[in-house]
Structures are given as structure tokens and as C-alpha cells.
Amino acid sequence: MTDTSAYTPPKVWTWETESGGTFASINRPIAGPTHDKDLPVGKHPLQLYSLATPNGVKVTVLLEELLALGIKEAEYDAWLIKIGDGDQFGSGFVGANPNSKIPALVDHSFAEPQRVFESGAILLHLAERFGKFMSTDPAARAETLSWLFWQMGSAPYLGGGFGHFYAYAPEKFEYPINRFSMEAKRQLDVLDRQLADHAFIAGDTYTIADIAIWSWYGQLVLGRLYDAAEFLDVESYENVLRWAKAIDARPAVQRGRMVNRTFGEPELQLHERHDADDFDTQTQDKIGDPA
């Protein structure tokens, strides 16, 4: 149905009422903390504060991939941030990420703990620190970074654009749904053309670009985002589907998806993670033991 209502923007916008929709209670036009709350600190140098949204999944997948390679220094504590409850506006979290978005990482490996926020920055920090999933070859590195930043720039149109108006907005209007569906499909076509000639996003090697992009677009075509797989005709993106399924089969990816997850199948939820043995025996039998 076409929205035929007229709206004239005011001369100066003011925040008078909630905008409605699924996340209306946590949306506000100002930054900063709303309450005092320190962040917990566990026993490992890497302290992650997150939730298993696509942006959160990026980081836990990379950490589990690093651990699967036998890099013990990548052990981490993952603390649950309940964004629906406003945990991201606590003073401790705002100190770790002034943008109040998950995920946030605090790396205690340094003399002074180093905060790292924005999921792409966290992936790059960890890849460079451990020398994995990022080539040192200048050309390959540039290609990986290009696709990593493609994801960072493109996903807001998928999530805040398509996902919001198709799945979360209080009312459905034709114009925004059409506008962002077109963009979502264009982005899938970009990926499908790239993957027609490459096993992975940046070439023949699995990198942080794959992890970042899979967490959004891979899960989309696998039917895990916005209940929109049929609507977007994801089956037509055969190369993206092939790639998404291959990454989904990796045990480290399956473990990473579980961490800080509070929704979906109970057996695939691990609200907090502090050691590899936090994954229960039943789940290990299903997805494979960590290295």
C-alpha cells in the first residue's frame, strides 16, 4: 500500500515522542550515560561486551577462529549487554564505547587497557595483533580492507534501512520498503558477482572480510535475518549461498554464533562465555570440539 499522507518537516526538529517500532525505547537523540554501572572484568586480557546481533557475531566468530588455530592468547571473557534493557547506556559501557553500540572490546594486554569499539575496528585490531585472517601482502591486504569497509558502509542500509522498515517499523509503507529492498538486492548482487570468481570475498583465502560480511549477508541468505529470505529471493544469489553455507559449516563460526545469544533455540544460546568449556557437551557433539 502506498503512503499518501503528507508530512511537512518542522523548521527545527525536536524530540517530543518515541518514534515507535521495536527499538523505540532505546532510541534517543543524545549520547552519554543514563546511569552509573561499572563493567565486569574477567580473568583474560580480552574483555568483550556484546550481544549476538550480526555486529556482535563478527567478533566472537573471529575469536573462536583464532582459538581454533591454537592461539591461547585469544582466550576471552564475553559479557552480555542487554540492549533492550539499556545496558549500553551504563557509564562503564559508555567509557568503552562512547557511541553506546555493541560490541565493545577492552584489551588489557597493554600497560593501560585499550578500548576498541566499532566491530570492524575490533576485527582489524585482533587480526593485526595475532597475524591471522589478514594477509601481509599489500595487494591482498588492500582487497581485504576494501571489502571490510564495504560491509561497514553497506550494512546500515540493510539493517537500519531494509530491516527496520520491513521488519521493525510500527507501520509498513511502500516507499521505504521498496527503496531499501532495491538496495539490499543490489548489495547481494555485488557479492554474488564477486563470489562468482572467488572462493571467498577477498580472493581464495578466508579473511576478516568474510567474517564481517557473513555475519550480515550470509545470515540473511540463510534465513536468519528479518524473516526476509523469500521476500528478497535469496535463492537467486547462488554464489552467495554457496559461500554462506561453507562458512556456516565451520565449527568456530557455529560456536561464535552462540556467544552472547539470548534468542532462538535454547541449545544454541551461551549468554556469557569465559572459557572453552562453557560450551556444554551436547553442543560440542553437535558442532565439534574447539582446537
Image (cartoon, rainbow, N blue to C red):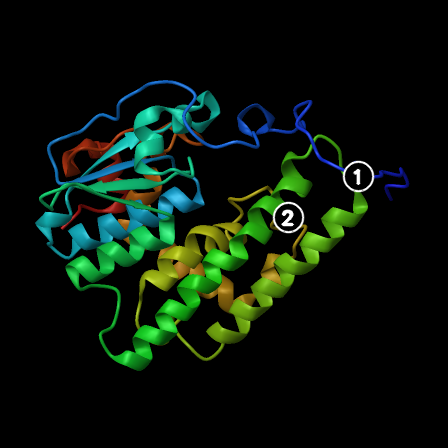
Q: In this view, does 277 lie above or below 141?
A: above
Q: Give the class, few, some or many, for how many residues have Cα within 10 Å of label 1's Cα (few <14, many ≥20).
A: few
* Residue 245, position as x, y percentages in the image: 42, 58
Q: Nearest to the eye among marks 2 and 1: give it.
A: 1
What type is the residue that disc 2 sits on? Phe
> At x 28% / y 43%, what residue is drawn?
255
Q: Quadrant of residue 34?
A: top left
Tell me how far mark 2 sits from mark 1, CA to CA.
22 Å
Q: Is residue 124 above or below residue 84?
A: below
Which residue extends farthest front? 11
| Residue of label 2 | 162
Question: Number of numbered discs present?
Answer: 2
In the structure shown, which secondary structural element does the residue marked by tag 2 occupy?
helix
Image vertical order of residue 48 relative to residue 89, above or below:
below
Residue 32 lies, in percent from the top left, at 43, 29
Q: Is residue 82 among the parts visible in the rendering?
A: no
What number is the disc on residue 126?
none
Could you say whether the residue bearing mark 1 is in a helix, strand or loop? loop
Quarter of the image with the N terminus in it = top right
Q: Is residue 127 above or below residue 258?
A: below
* Horizontal side, residue 40 vs residue 238: left or right: left
| Residue at (22, 47) in percent of width and height | 288
Residue at image location 51% in from the left, 44% down from the top: 224
Return the disc, 2 or 1, that comes first in the chain's sequence: 1
Q: What residue type is labelled 1?
A: Pro
Is residue 92 visible to the viewer in this orientation of the structure? yes
Quarter holding residue 233: bottom right
Q: Residue 9 carries which label?
A: 1
| Left or right of 211, for residue 289 | left
- Residue appearing at x 31%, y 67% in the figure: 206
